[in-house]
Amino acid sequence: MTACFERVYGRSYVARFFYDPEAIRMRMADGRLVPVVAVSSGGEVAGHMALTQSHRGARTAEAGNTAVDPRFRGHGLAARLGAALIEECRGRGFVGFHHYPTTAHPIMQKLAVQGGGVETGVMLDYIPAGTDYRELEVAADGRLAVVVVYQPILAAPARTVFVPGRYQQALRGIYERAGLERVFGTGTTANEEVTAAISYDVARRLRRIEVLVPGTGLDRTLEETMAAAPAEVTHADLPLGHAATPAAIDTLLRYGFVYCCVLPELRADGDVLRMQRLPHPLARGTGPELVHSHARELHALALRDSGREP
């Protein structure tokens, strides 16, 4: 497997454990990594995708770590790996999975939608600069965006979600395309203290703020967190099942966050809305290469949030 990643990415792949066979085995043994691989007639790993579960009890998994050896491209291998991944999800009882096709080239974006995936947003500057897409004509001078796609597989629970008015039309469209039954509730002001988990991905220079309870004191949490360490991108995840989430989103907007994506059933308590903050303003006409109109419309939400009407 390590040889496949080296042939695809050189030594630039951000998840460094894919270059360590023992680290891969440990993750497979404890269930953190569920790989699906294609093996050539000569016994080489020709392609790879994998599932990970970010949150215990979640009804969805995250799919990714896609690598197709340049020698075996052009034969529909990525599509077949994706089909196998769907069956793996089905067998494990997941209602769907999230995946993140890169905007470095259009192939994965097209495959994600052709397979029934629903675009839910765009994560800007997610892939670090210097990631090497071998055999592809990709400019790697700066960071790259990914499209966020939800792949529905089984029926998901009906839920009530609390969404600010500025996003309701977009999320209604996403939920309808994904076949998810959602009722939009009326948000309230926070009546308890904020609870959040903070982490920092050194390789990606990505700060994560996972808001568990969107309560009072979010301003203080944001100020302390963003002053602690520099980051190329900051993500803030909020529970859409909590009535105080719309008020928390208003706070995040004041601190320069913009729309990123919705992640159905990402946590045990249901859907998550992800906001993103970059250290530079979004500029019209210089965004990522997006293949489909739905992705472009969702990227336009981020532009509007930043005060730059597309």
Image: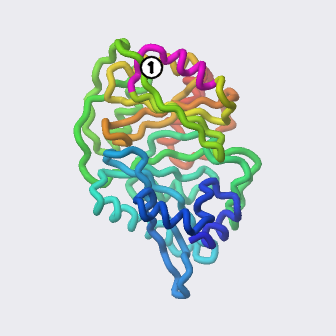
- The amino acid type, in three-letter code, at marker 1 is Ala
Q: Quadrant of the C terminus?
A: top right
Residue sitting farthest toward the bottom: 42
Say which residue label 1 marks: 248
Q: Secondary structure at mark 1?
A: helix
Q: Position of residue 302 (x, y in %)?
A: 55, 30
Colour scheme: rainbow
First to last magenta residue range: 213-226
Q: Is residue 118 left or right of residue 19?
A: left
Residue 130 is at least partly visible in this image: yes
User: Against 49, is 216 above or below?
Assistant: above
| Residue pictured at 43% horizontal, 49% vertical | 98
| Residue pictured at 52% horizontal, 54% vertical | 109
Q: Position of residue 201 (x, y in %)?
A: 60, 42
Q: Is residue 221 left or right of residue 93?
A: right
Task: Assess whether residue 32 is covered by the magenta stretch.
Answer: no
